Structure formats: structure tokens, C-alpha cells
Amino acid sequence: MSFSDIPVDVGPVYEGERIRAKQMYVELGGPKIETGHFELVRVRPAKEIKDGQIKVIGPDLKDMEEGSTHPIGILVEVSGPELEEDLEAVFERRVHEFCNFVNGIMHLNQRYTNWMRISKAAFEKGFNSFELLGTVLIRLYKAELPIIKQAQVTIYTDPKEIEKPYEMAMKVYNARDERARSINDEDVDMYYGCVLCQSFAPTHCCIITPNRMSLCGSISWFDARAASRVDPKGPLFEVEPKKCLNDVAGEFEGVNETLKKRSLGEIDRIYLYSGMEYPHTSCGCFEAIDFYIPEINGHGIIDRSYDGVAINGLPFSAMANQTGGGKQMPGFNGISIQYIISPKYQLYDGLQDGLKSGIETVVWMGKTVKDRIAEFLPADLVDKIATEEDVQDINQLRDWIEKVKHPIMETEGYKAAIGGEEEEEEWEEEGAMVPMGTVGMTIPGAGGVGGFKVILKNCKIHAESIIIKRIEPKRKK
Ligand code: SF4
Ligand code: ZN
């Protein structure tokens, strides 16, 4: 396969390339875009595909002003005698990988949170049309996935024209998610693994079960099964769970063995249903973050669209640094939104605390994520989970919990966490206390590859002042 007619290099070596705001020519999709944006793959009958056709609906790259932001919709339609609808989601996940092959394109996220940047350097070299992107996608799809025989690509950038295909894409995502909710881990004898993200997080391997959709939120158990059937040696593969070592924690002998092999020996034990003990690793493309709130002994959840700081004083970006990188991070888990409404959601952590389920540990959620899943949350709990509209800090959250009688109140962990209030007031009078919550106890940006993390559970640090100083690296003369 040749890309000699493309003005920039194309290849896996460019995956992981970062394009900072100063280096970008334009930004596409992402959090600044309020209209819908999406990427979608659909399997069609051969007669509906014009192989190689690329359509650009809306302004092309060369018509866009430097530094501007636009919606982006990428619709890839494919056909082939062996293709089935179950393969669409897995094909769709490759949009991320294939876009990142292009030197000068950074692609993040998936589905309706897709976010791209095109670099000035690529634009100056002549990468000035989405037709070039369409050409690269079609060539890579057909070369990397030979069961795809015909492919066409439509790229939408017009804010009006994108509306209909965006709505269609949302319907497809919802139908996939609904189907994924129809079975449970106990109903199957095979789980699946995915190592597509190892180019970013070399020790990360997703374990996909019916109750635990991949953390990127784009590959369900059905999708993974279909992909591993057509390409058993590919990035998605079978994981035989073998002996169950702990059904509440979701620990399986076969899962541990697979992880050891696939994580270069780094991870050899996970609890699929815990965020606190031997948690699943996170790469970087999780839909949401589930974080522990030590002052309450409960959990909070934010998704990528969350703007501002969460109840623990950290924005999504700081927590994402802490969470990602393929390490096990107790208290910071990258998760899919579907997993939150799974009956197995952090089941071990809930039961350890004497609760009925894992979802009962959740005391706070960003409003957008709560609105998305409210109809699936337990009826007696949904109104007890606060959002940023109800409370703004930990003290208010504590008052909220007591007011709504959130089940976390009954846990020993909560009682221990809120204990010592009287002592705190005494110290406050002397003006000598800086109560330190999660903000002070974690080091955002220091997690992930090569970093470290300190979690001090249920602890207060008293200090007269705190100096946080950046240490500048010594410059060579
Ligand atoms: Fe695969 Fe997991 Fe990456 Fe999704 S997040 S592409 S399932 S490794
Ligand atoms: Zn990933």
C-alpha cells in the first residue's frame, strides 16, 4: 500500500503524536463544539457503495480559517460478503487509529466525543483537503481489514448539514448500547480482550464482558465477539475466564493469566468489579472517570464533557492524567458510561462497605452524565446523587448526604470519614488548619506512565502554610 500521493507521511509511527494549540491549523469536534459531531461506520449492501467515493459536505480544510474550530462528522460505509452489523463498532474504533497514522493529525475519543486537530505543518505541506483524509481511511480500511471489499467516506463539516447524520449516529449508538444491556457475565463462557490502545499505554489491555463494556464505550461484548471471530489474531481476542476466584470482585484465573501475558508481565491480577482493589487499568480514552472521595468514603463520576472542577476540586484533565497510562490506580478508574448502569458496577466496593450494590457508593455525578443515565439508575437512589447544581464543595456534599439520607451514611467508612469534626472546629479557631481533601492528597499530572500517586485515606493534614514549587530542569550550557 502506497501513500506517495499524500503530502504527509502515513504510518503507525505517528500514533501518539500530540498537536498543541499553538501548532494546530484547525480543530474539529471536541468540547468546544456545541453542535453534534460524530464518527460512525455502517455495513451496507455492495450495491449501495461506490467504492473509493469521498464526499465533503461543508467547508473543506482549505476553506477554513487558521485557528478555527468546526464540527466534524465522519461516516465510513463498507461492504463485503462476510461483513455483519456486529462488526461496525469495532471498525469504527479504527477511525481513531487510522487518523492518528497521519503525520499531522491528532485524533482523540470516539463516537460523539471525537476530537481532531490538523497541524499547521501538515497543512503547509499540502494536506489541505478532507479528500486526502478520506483516501487514507479507505486505503487503510481495505488493507488492514481485508474482509472489507468496498468503502466510501462522507465527511460533514457544515453545522446544519451535520444535524441529520448526527441524529442517525446517536440512534445507532443507543441501539448498540441497548443490546449490550441484554445479557450478563454469568450468561456467557467467553470474555474478550482488546489491546488496540497499547500504542499509547503499552501495559493496558481491556477486558470486555457483557456487564463491563470497554472503557472507551465503543466496544461491547457482542462487538468484541464478532471482531475476534473474523480476525482471531487481531487486536481483539478471546479470553477464557476459567475458574472464578471471587464472584463478587469479578476475579477470574483466565483473565489474570491473559493480563499477565498481554501487559508485559506488569499486571497479573484484576478485580473486574472494583475501583479500589486490583482495579482494571485505564489507557486514556475512557468515557468517564470514577473517583474516590475520601472525605465521604463515596465515589464521584465525571465524563469528558464536564467543564470546570468536580466536587474534589479537580478538572477532568487533571484526573485523566492521574487515571490513564495503563497502570492500576485505586481510586481513579477510567470507565464507560454503560458500565455505571451495569449490575456489576464496582459491586465489590459496595458490598465491602455493607451496601447492596456498587452504585450505592456514588454520591456525586456531573450533571451531563447523570442526565444520560438517570432512567437506568435505581429509583430510590437517583435523586440522592448530587450534581454540580446541588452542591459545590465537600461540606455541602456532606450536608446533602445527610439531608437526602444517602445510603452511604450508614457505612462505617462514612462514619469514620466524617468523624473528628469537633476537633477540626477547635483547630480552625486557632487559625492553624488547612483541611486537605483529595485535592491535596493526589498529585494531578504525576500519575500515568512513570508517575506516582499518594492516597492518604481518611486523613487530615494540618500545616501553617504550603509551598508548591516547580523545579526547573537544569539547562545544559
Ligand atoms: Fe480497545 Fe480498550 Fe482501547 Fe477501547 S479502550 S480501543 S476496547 S483497548
Ligand atoms: Zn484507549
Image (cartoon, helix red, strand yellow):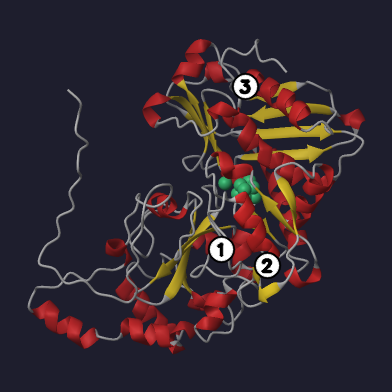
Judging from the image, what secondary structure is the residue with disc 1 in?
helix
Q: Position of residue 413 (x, y in %)?
A: 41, 83
Of badges 3 and 2, nearer the viewer stands 2
* Numbered mark located on residue 141 in the image: none
Which residue lies at the image location 39% right of the left edge and 60% below the top edge?
A: 310
Residue kind at label 3, given as amino acid type: Phe
- Position above or below: 38 against 412: above
Of residues 110 and 231, the one drawn nearer to the viewer in this rendering:
231
Instruction: Please tell me in which quadrant of the rendered image residue 411 appears.
Output: bottom left
Of residues 257 and 51, the one drawn nearer to the viewer in this rendering:
257
Residue kind at label 2, given as amino acid type: Glu
- Name the residue that disc number 2 marks: 253
The residue lying furthest to the left in this view is 430
- Name the residue that disc number 1 marks: 371
Instruction: Please tell me in which quadrant of the rendered image residue 388 appears.
Output: bottom left
Mark with earlier residue (2, 1): 2
The answer to whether marks 2 and 1 mark residues whose Cβ atoms lie closer than 8 Å is no
